Amino acid sequence: MKTIAIRTREHLLNTLAEAAELEHNLMCLYLYAVFTLKESQDEGLNRAEWDAVGRWRRTMLDVCVQEMAHLALVSNLTTAVGGTAHFFRSDFPMKPGYFPADFVMELAPFDLDTLQHFIFLERPEDLPVEDAATAQDKDDYRRDAPRGRLMTHVGDYQTVGQLYEAVEDGLHYLSEKIGEKALFCGPASLQLSPADVELEGLTLITDSAAAVQALRSIVEQGEGGKGQEGSHFASFCHIKEEYLTLLDANPHFQPARPSARNPVMRRPAEDDGRIWVQAQPAARFMDLANALYGLMLRFLVQVYSMESRPAAQKKILLNAAFTLMHALSATARHLTKLPAHPEHPGVNAGLSFALNRHFTPFEVGNEKMLLSERVSEVMAAMDAVIEGEGISALQKVRESLESIHVSLNQLPEDQ
């Protein structure tokens, strides 16, 4: 039974914004789990376990890259129908009602429960899958979306596939109602194209046919079905099978570090299970890691901020974003080795993916100055951490930031 009926452009854009946040959040959940995975046999792994964890890391990173492509496709579709790319998202853990009840969005270290939750989130609509025990105490609610309202609400859906099916139906309805030319009114030059970056399935969207192809590719890559090799669902199921085999051989097998569930940078306003990362150097390191994450997204936001941006300028912004992704990974992995809080012995820190509230694009004429200013601020903070804590893991990250700072000199002073 279809519960979402998109009948206006406003409702379509609102739904696409939720889809963008959903893809973004899934990527964060998977990355957090990846960052917690152990990286050497010295962390209590035998050779077979170490080999398996390495395979799982590569598989899950491939999934994250595909989630990035999904976010880019949703952004392309959003700009194609007259909106702007949406990269902002709420802090973890998500409050009840922000997504449907089945979509529990919490950061958790890699273990069997976390993996089972990933399998549940990526499940095909026609396949019964139990959620993890840690997620089964979820709040039971419905997100009703009365039809005919001016203030639109996305409504309820049980799977990612159902959400995109509703978007596809809405596109067909609006194409008939207002005409395809009127619906797809956004400039293609605002979109991210295969010529800009190599991401599997990435395509420009200028009409209904391209939009439907993009939506269906997202669902096929994600749910796919257990028999479809390479889908996120199948990949997570394969990891679980191998995980259980290794547990049978060694009941004490622990593939991940004991990182916090839902780490936060500030004291929580209420005691809801979040872990306040207060211990040093973890608190300073976490601040730095979140700044790198925000800066990475800032460069991606700017990519979508200007029509007909010259290819060379777009490449500078994209190269900076991908450089920051690698820098973020190195920083976030190191963070999972650091104690989180003196009142939580044995619990390590982790990246919280926190964002500042201001996340609209910089005005293009000022972007060079503002981006350079922010890069300089992050470098200065990084220098202080390196000097104060002697953390060698930051040296290469610092070099990456310096290369970004130099590359920004190639942008014009104004557009």
Image (cartoon, rainbow, N blue to C red):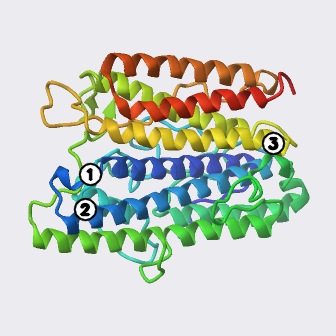
Query: Which residue: 53% across, 31% down?
Result: 399
Residue 277 position, x and y percent, is 28, 27
Residue 243 position, x and y percent, is 23, 68
Along the line of sight, the residue nearer the viewer: 292 or 181: 292
Residue 262 appears left or right of 82: left
Q: Which quadrant holds residue 340?
A: top left
Q: Are marks 2 and 3 in contact (CB under 8 Å)?
A: no
Q: At label 2, which amino acid type do we have? A: Trp
Q: At label 1, which amino acid type do we have? A: Lys
Residue 400 position, x and y percent, is 55, 34
Q: At label 3, which amino acid type do we have? A: Ala
344 versus 370 height, above or below: below
Considering only order in the chain, which callout, 3 or 1, is on the residue closer to the N terminus?
1
- What is the total number of numbered labels drawn onto the structure image? 3
Q: Which quadrant holds residue 207?
A: bottom right
Residue 174 appears left or right of 92: right
Q: CA distance from mark 1 to mark 3?
A: 39 Å
| Secondary element type, mark 2 | helix
Considering only order in the chain, which callout, 1 or 2, is on the residue closer to the N terminus?
1
Considering only order in the chain, which callout, 3 or 2, is on the residue closer to the N terminus?
2
Q: Which mark is residue 38?
A: 1
Along the line of sight, the residue nearer the viewer: 311 or 283: 311
Which residue is at the far left? 251
Along the line of sight, the residue nearer the viewer: 234 or 414: 414
| Secondary element type, mark 1 | loop
| Secondary element type, mark 3 | helix
Q: Are marks 2 and 1 in contact (CB under 8 Å)?
A: yes
Q: Which residue is mark 3?
A: 312
For the C terminus, which image quadrant?
A: top right
Residue 352 position, x and y percent, is 39, 35
